[in-house]
Amino acid sequence: MKVSLDWLNSDYVDLSDLSHEQVAEKLTMGAFEVEEVTVHGSDLEGPVVVGEILEIHQHPNADKIRLTRTRVKAGDEPLDIVCGAQNIEVGQIIPVALPGAKVVNRHDGSPLPIKASAIRGVKSNGMLCSAAELGIACDDKFGEGILVLADKDSPKKSGFTLGADARELLQIKPDHIMHVEPRSNRGDALCVAGLAREIAALFNRPLKQPTWNLEQYENKEAKVGTINSVKLENEEDCPFFSLIPIKGVKVGPSIPEISKRLEAIGVRPVNNVVDITNYVMHELGQPLHAYDAAKLSGSSMAVRRARAGEKLTTLDEKVRELTPEVMLIVDDDTAIGVAGIMGGKDSEISDSTTDIYLEAACFSQAVVRRGSRLLGLSSDASLRFERRVDVASVFHAARRAAYLIAHYCGASGPAQVGKAMMAGSDKVSDVYLTLRLSAVKRLLDIEVTAERVRELLSPLGFMVEAGESGQLKIAVPSFRQADVTREIDLIEEICRLNGYDAIAATMPKGIVCRQAKDDTLVKAQSALVGMGLSEAWCSSLVPASENGINEDYLVQVLNPLSKDHQYLRQSLVPGLVHALAHNLDRGQKKVALFESGRVYFKEWEEPAPDNKTDNNQERSAKLFAKEINRLAAIICQADKQSSEKADFYAMKGVLENLLSGLAISLAADKVNWQAASVPGLHPFRCAALALNRPPKKGSDHSDKVGIFGNPMVLGYVGQIHPSYAHAMGIKEEAFVFEIDLDRIGAERKAAKFSEIANTPSMVRDLTIDFSKEVLEKQNDINHQNIVRLIMRSGSKNLVDVQLVSVYQSEGAAHTYRLTFQNPSETLTGEEVDNLVKEVKSQLTKQLNASFRA
């Protein structure tokens, strides 16, 4: 919603001593977020004055332009001014830009300096200005002509002073426009008057009201058209409907002071009558509609539901097929508008309109919302009805619009306003709420008195009366009865009006500890970001066809948005594959992403036996969704020239670095890598990391499906299967890992600090040979088993084992570097040699190994 600060300041609340930043900040802190403030309008430079055309002559050297004699100050000699507009007449009051002024170039919006110059051989001493040249928006059919402030016979002509500053008269100056986020439950604030009420309360300033008097233009005997009554089919659909006849209207150009305000908030001016209905809607929040009385032939106007198959051409010139869920305005039984949304084309205001009917009503929020969705048609009117229009304010807005139309749009003098026709009731029952001052103290921790509550709430229309001890009786205004229904709502109003900054900051009481699994996640995220990966957020909802899905354990969504969002995911990998494809498709060469989140499995819990129940009686199992925390990552390198490679071992290295940072021991006697098969991954480039022992209590959950069905598996790493990658449009090799965060968290060791050894370490290289025959007979000869056996044989003084090289022909030779160290004393060469002999002995005994001299 756009709101003009100049409109607020001029008509409703004095903000002249405040900057737009101060107003925007206060509104935002008062729960009406100002998204931005923009500047609208041109800063014209004077002199731009009020003038009167005294004479018009044909230009001696041109057919399409004329020479005027225009007086710009009483008593002064008229000026010769050349003009090409065709709508000028003798006696008109018009704005004149004199030499030295700067106006707006209506072709490109740039500044246009005015100077005395010869036009086709005749000197022109200024320029008669159009609305566009003054920076005022106007409908195209009126925008080409000079802006006429008053015609020669207009009674308003006497109100203009020649030589007066036209910029002040037309309020032409830069205006600050606040873009306020509309609140779904505050339809009352979707207008200038509503926000002005909020601003006045927030700044504790008096609220002004525009002065107007409709009675001077009312003529109860004025007859307009054939409509003599209004009817309602269902008062639940439309509680109140009013129709005001107005006689003697002349449709013409937009009224400058009104069109200027509309254009500032982004509303395109149309003509003087339509502009006033739009103006009042944005001023008071009440949608209005004007009908050409000559285009209606019935005796009554009514509100009813549409019939199946009924059609209507709306103002946007589209033929709408209607259903009984749509509400209509009808002339007798002929549809002339979609109630609360848009009027019909056949009854719209035109240049020939002389008499009108002005409609103002309150329509059901639900019916308007449903009709708008069914027709695919939204408007400023439907936006307001959907957020609730105050029925008690409907007729006030109608009279305000009738006054403006009578005042500005009369054909010869003011138009005549006839007797209003009404159906339904605009009466609202009083609503009272009780407010306990003790509840304010308990919830906000601030002391407020009854007088302070009155100071805060009265500017918003609440009536505060003293009640029983410590309690107040508060009457809720009609326009707030939808959103203020409980004591807590009143406390919310007190809180925001008193200021959120008035609530003292207090520390929370109690001890707050981060859970271990949360700590694991935080450390894992930090480690992966440190390794150059970016975090991704993927949808938890997937189709049944996603890789890795086991249909027996799928958790189905009851009301899915689409077929691609029917189930909760069982793996993080498919989402990351989609994210990878998305990034590669947009030209990214190197992609490294990770995601942490939950996966879901259907679970059944068998009921406990009931001694009171017959053992043969069937008991039903409880069905629920099991949630498991996972972490997954994906890498891909599409740049063939890059020295950074993305392959299986790079991904395995990322996972090992991550686990090391999480204090998960990767020693061969703790964990082992084993070949694995995971849906969607390459069958020969996939490995699982598993514990060498049963998991700790609390982390022994089984996913029942897939590789994590083995409770000893911590995670896996592998390459995306080429066929899966091809189906996703991925041409490069991509590698992933996925780990179970719950199991990882349970296996983490607490950090222990130990003294750095001040004794020297000793290193021995050991080359182990395996003959062809040994390799053929024993299938347990691999790196992990070798390291595990060395560590077990080397006593506690063997602190590290590293693979140096592997040579393979018919047999195999593995060279390992063994590091020995005793933290309390220096080892001798003889002691180390004895330890190496023990290692060799065990390798020979267990693996039939031999050694080089």
Image (cartoon, grey):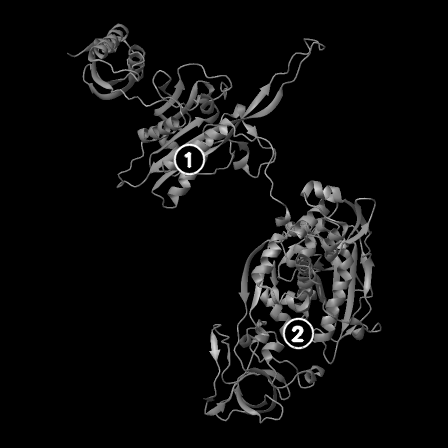
Above/below status of 823 relative to 474: above
Disc 1 target residue: 526
Measured from the top left, where is residue 538 in percent x and y?
A: 48, 37
Q: Is residue 594 left or right of residue 496?
A: left
Q: Residue at x 73, y 57 (%)?
A: 459
Query: Is residue 182 in view from this perspective?
Result: yes
Which badge, 2 or 1, comes first in the chain's sequence? Answer: 2
* Quarter of the picture holding the N terminus: bottom right
Which is more foreground, mark 2 or mark 1?
1
Q: Quadrant of residue 16?
A: bottom right
- The residue under label 2 is 351
Using the image, determine if residue 231 lies above or below residue 574.
below
Q: Residue at x 80, y 75 (%)?
A: 216
Q: Position of residue 691 (x, y in %)?
A: 41, 18
Q: Is residue 573 visible?
A: no
Q: Is residue 2 above or below residue 160?
A: above
Residue 682 picture location, percent across and down: 36, 27
For residue 16, the mark is: none
* Left or right of 490, for residue 315: left
Q: CA distance from mark 2 to mark 1?
A: 69 Å
- Give residue 19's position: percent from left, percent from top: 57, 63
- Which amino acid, by three-letter code, is at mark 1? Ser
Q: How dense is the environment of label 1, judged by Cα within 10 Å: few (below 14), some, or many (20 and up)?
A: some
Q: Which quadrant is home to the C terminus?
A: top left
Question: Within the image, what quadrant is residue 181 found in?
Answer: bottom right
Q: In which image quadrant can residue 209 be found?
A: bottom right
